[in-house]
Amino acid sequence: MKQDVPNLLALLKQHFGFASFRPLQEQIIRDALAGRDVLALLPTGGGKSLCYQLPALARPGLTVVVSPLIALMKDQVDALQASGVAATFLNSSLNTTEARARLRGLHQGQYRLLYLAPERLMLDGCLADLQGWQVNLFAIDEAHCISEWGHDFRPEYRQLVRLREVFPQVPFMALTATATERVRQDILKQLHLRSPGFYVASFNRPNLTYRVLPKAKAAEQVLAYVRAHPRDSGIVYCQARKTTESMAGRLAEAGVKALPYHAGLTTGERSRNQELFLRDEVRVMCATIAFGMGINKSNVRFVMHCDLPKNVESYYQETGRAGRDGLPSECVLLFSAGDVVKHQQFINEKPDPREQQIAREQLQQMVHYAEISECRRAALLDYFGETYPETHCGGCDNCLAPRATYDGTVEAQKFLSCVYRVRERCGFGVGLNHIVEVLTGADTEKIRRWGHEQLSTYGIGKQHHRSEWAVIGRELVRLGYLRQTAEKFSVLELTPEGMAVLKQRQSITLTQPMALPEAKFHRAGEITCDEVLFEQLRQLRKQLADERGVPPYIIFSDVSLRQMARNYPQDESGFARISGVGENKLREFGAVFLDAIAGHLRTNPRQVFAEDWSVVTPARSSGVNDSMRETMRRFRAGQSVKEIARQRGFVPGTIYGHLAGAIEAGERLELDRFFSAEELEKVAPWFAKNGFANLGESLEALGGQIEYGRLRIYRAIRNQQAKR
């Protein structure tokens, strides 16, 4: 099999402009080429599409892609055609003449990929045609749609099992970005996958920063955020159609190009608004959850939720539409307890008690995420069964600006004691809201009927507002001192740990609730570049895209443009080394972009950038600061980079930066502290041939197996050795 590697890599660079595969892509592609069924869970932006697109180019025949949305089909086909790949789609957006022309091309074997919706695919006439088109793979995109336990169940996906009867020898590839263990098993069962290759990539999106803010005048909060990011494109999710309309109108009145998107608009209105957003004519899309699946716009820099999503899976999928190009992007959730009440009302209207219970459990998990004081990234990954290895992610509000804690022993004792006294008197439990009413001395019909005004805990919590007691109660649930049931009449119960707190009067530390104003956060991982040139290249990209009738990111992603504005390529050889530049794009766009870069340099000085993405002057002064010295002291004492990062409250990349900076300033460290002999056998020849100019490219070329920080260390040590 090894002899195929150069061929696959050559196809990858030729058509897609990438020098190496992302995690798991190559294994998935090899399974597909070997005729094996595959179930792949890759995060949004993790390269799912390439897993079936590259096999389609590696052998003759037709790959059929099952896709749920017309917009997704057109988007992917446009991108493939721009990369020189013969792809097409058949759906209701085509007129009769266009459809017949594409059918003729399919009968003549002109295409490698065909995109179809499940409804059209399962028509008898379509199945008969496919039997004559040499189908070698069925790729089921958004495969979670086949599961009734998924967050976006589509009954028409259930029909796909019939493909097994008609095409028993053709392998299936099922792909999704979000699926819990229950959904994964349902996909396997519903598609009748046979001993499939099963691949689950990390759900971590390191370029995304997660934040939760208390909701207060949501429209003003959104407007303030959008104004603070004047060049960024984003999505603002709202629960109701009316809210999307009013939010878009509020932004438009303030001079922000914004439009609504929801199911109440006509098909033509939705298509028009979406197309304007994809083409950067509109900067902000205000939308319900009807918008987003399959939207491949790579430069969405922020996703804001004005209302609480109904479950963590939906939230993860929606936030995943930010930063698909890998550049830093933000996910902001505006949270209020009132949103929880609204969801509970919707849940109570569901006719099926089982559905109600599932929805309540999911809502509790979503509220838990919104209110936790621990790392939000770790909480998201834990939901999907993945453990985040660090204690400080450096990319969420709780890690970047931890909320203050306080001695909450008295509050905890009062709350837990009230739960105990209520059950002791009545013999049954009550919900969180009723406990809060007892603590605050409310005069309600239930309190009078059950005699709870006579409890010793009645009115002992008047020093706190009801909303404050609700936050305390939910935190006690998260800490494990209380259990909250998920039935219709959800009740609180003391756990053994909670009973121990009451009996032993243990001290309890609680977290201060979220408060405005919001803190300021950095955008870690930004590719710093010549911003003036970047803006010129963005305008050029927009012009070229408009001429071709495609969204700008089809031409090049922001990552590609930022690399151009950082590396200033001067010829085709240098331009071809930019990520995302394949043969077709080099041939079609190379000259015009090289001309723009050269024109910029004729009137502007060339900037020099450090590898930690900060602008520096060519004559950079170096020195070891106190933080570097402390890191060096710990490292020389035998601590690992991860240990130092954890103890000092940094991410490992920062510690590697300290060490590299110290080495560049003259401190000595040996390579064998950072690399095994086998790793050095890979790294040394690469750098000997290609030099140290672009560590990002080196990271890709080495398969992402060696961290960026260690590559910085290698460069620093080798440069110092060369000076001795």
Image (cartoon, rainbow, N blue to C red):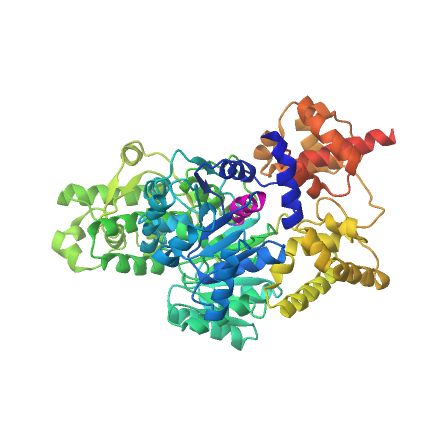
Q: In this rendering, does residue 423 appear at all?
A: yes
What's the magenta bit mostly, secondary-structure-wise?
Answer: helix
Q: What is the quadrant of the C terminus in the image?
A: top right
Q: Is 155 a magenta residue? A: no
Q: Is residue 504 above or below residue 451?
A: above
- Is residue 212 visible in the rendered image? The answer is no
Which residue in the rendered view is the most extreme toward the right? 724
Instruction: Indicate the position of residue 17 as horizontal and vertical percent values.
Output: 66, 48
In the image, 465 versus 368, the foreground residue is 368
Number of marks in picture: 0
In-image side of 295 versus 461 (left or right): right
Q: Could you tell whether 662 is left or right of 373 in the image?
A: right
The quarter of the rendered structure image containing the N terminus is top right
26 with respect to 534 (left or right): left
- The image quadrant of residue 293 is bottom left
- Residue 716 is drawn in which quadrant? top right
Residue found at the very far left of the displayed protein: 449
**What is the quadrant of residue 586 in the picture?**
bottom right
Give yes or no for residue 50 being in the magenta stretch: yes
Looking at the picture, tell me which residue is in the foreground, 349 or 493.
349
Question: Which of the two residues, 26 or 104, is positioned nearer the viewer here?
Answer: 104
Q: Position of residue 423 (x, y in %)?
A: 18, 43
Residue depicted at 32% across the width and 50% down the height = 158
The magenta segment: 45-58
In percent of the image, x 67 and y 32: which residue is there?
Answer: 631
How far from the left and from the top, in percent, is residue 497? 30, 33
Q: Position of residue 246 (x, y in %)?
A: 43, 73
Nearer the observer, 575 or 303: 575
Is 512 above or below relative to 651? below
